[in-house]
Image (cartoon, grey):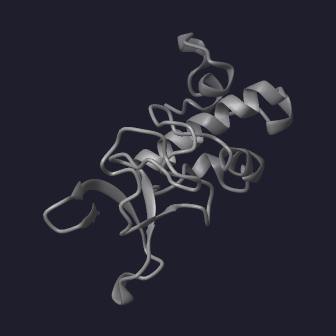
Amino acid sequence: KDATWSLATLSLKPEDANILTYKMSDFSEEQKTALAGWYKHFTTKYPVVGKLREYEGWDFSEIEALSEHQTPFGAIAGAGAGAEGEEEEAGGGAAASGGGALPSGAVTLSSGDAVRITGIEDLEGKKGTLITYRADRGGFEVK
């Protein structure tokens, strides 16, 4: 069953599952923001492997654009995953030791954050998911 309507309207009613007769214009700005938050959550946590045939020809670009400014659920705002092109660079040691105030421009990375790899020729620009910081190797493990 599709949960798009339910996620946008924050409905737990069984009859709101699998509704495919709506248009984006049916949602309020608040509902579009809620849907964008869910979109960010799921696309950060799981790879997109396909789309429902029922959505062929639908335009979700407004929701995708709104999601660029969302923080995935369970993540710290401003840390790790960012908007397209703003993923944190893997390889630095930003806030790895924790504690104290962070210097200007520093970020806190968490397991599961989306990252873009830099500084490794064969992997330059590739996207991945942060697994952990490996102190013994002086860098991050990225999948």
- Point out residue 118 in the picture as x, y percentages from the top left corner: 44, 77
Which of these two is toward me, 95 or 11?
95
- Relative to 122, is 108 on the left or the right? right
Which of these two is toward me, 136 or 113?
136
Residue 21 shows in this picture: no
- Relative to 82, is 132 on the left or the right? left
Q: Quadrant of residue 121?
A: bottom left
- The furthest residue to the right: 25
Compared with residue 24, is residue 117 higher up or lower down, i.e. above or below?
Answer: below
Number of numbered discs visible in the structure rendering: 0
Compared with residue 93, is residue 103 higher up or lower down, i.e. above or below?
Answer: above
- The furthest residue to the bottom: 121
- Point out residue 17 in the picture as x, y percentages from the top left corner: 56, 22
The residue at the point 62 percent across, 18 percent down is: 10
- The furthest residue to the left: 136
Q: Quadrant of residue 36?
A: top right
Which of these two is toward me, 64 or 141?
141
The residue at the point 80 percent across, 38 percent down is: 24
- Relative to 34, is 92 on the left or the right? left
- Point out residue 91 in the picture as x, y percentages from the top left corner: 36, 69
The residue at the point 58 percent across, 56 percent down is: 105
Residue 85 shows in this picture: yes
Compared with residue 136, is residue 62 higher up or lower down, i.e. above or below?
Answer: above
Q: Quadrant of the C terminus?
A: bottom left
- Point out residue 138 in the picture as x, y percentages from the top left corner: 23, 67
- Relative to 49, is 36 on the left or the right? right
The residue at the point 27 percent across, 54 percent down is: 131
